[in-house]
Image (cartoon, rainbow, N blue to C red):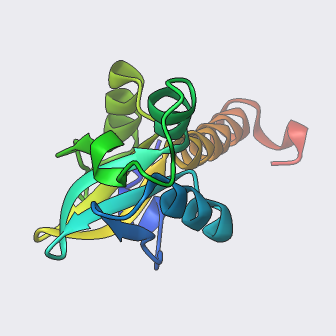
Amino acid sequence: MQQLRIMPDIIQNQTITSLTATRSVLEGAKLMAEKNVAAIIIVDDGKLSGIVTERDLTQRVLAKGMDAKKTSIGDIMTKDPDTLSPGDSAIDALELMSVRNYRHLPVVENGEVVGMVSIRDLYSAVKTGLEADIRETEAFVFGDRYGA
């Protein structure tokens, strides 16, 4: 299978959805709903300081009965999250996310967040690549019998 890279093979030209750590959880949840994203980047002085996901909102706020208006997003974020580089392979990223039970990871280049990749993005790209490999193998093994 072709070695797919996070950028540009999996994601390209993303707009990063972010907030500062002092904003409220409610503001974060509204931003996620407005942008239709399942995770946002938390920044401090323009640098990545954390990540907040839908799972964080559920487990760290709702399930604990916390007030989303009064709780800062920085209080519930995952601080200093693991990151990927644009040149990392999709397979390696998928393995990291699987082992550590992540669904989203920021993609960082030269200290700047340039994207966010989801396990769904990676799974879809790897699945497409594997299917193409299978078609090529069938064409090689069986020739034109199957329309290859």
- Residue at figure coordinates x 37%, y 68% from the top left: 19
- Residue at figure coordinates x 54%, y 41% from the top left: 126
Residue 42 image point, x, y percent = 30, 60
Eyeballing the image, is 143 above or below 64?
Answer: below
User: What is the quadrant of residue 130 in the picture?
Assistant: top right
Q: Nearer the viewer, residue 89 or 83?
A: 83
Lateral position of residue 49 relative to residue 136, left or right: left
The answer to whether residue 86 is seen in the rendering is no
User: What is the quadrant of residue 143 in the picture?
Assistant: top right
Q: Nearer the viewer, residue 25 or 50?
A: 25
- Residue at figure coordinates x 36%, y 28% from the top left: 95
Q: Nearer the viewer, residue 122 or 75?
A: 75
Eyeballing the image, is 124 above or below 116?
Answer: above
Residue 92 image point, x, y percent = 31, 36
Residue 74 image point, x, y percent = 28, 51
Residue 112 image point, x, y percent = 19, 72
Lateral position of residue 64 relative to residue 83, left or right: right
- Residue found at the far top of this picture: 99
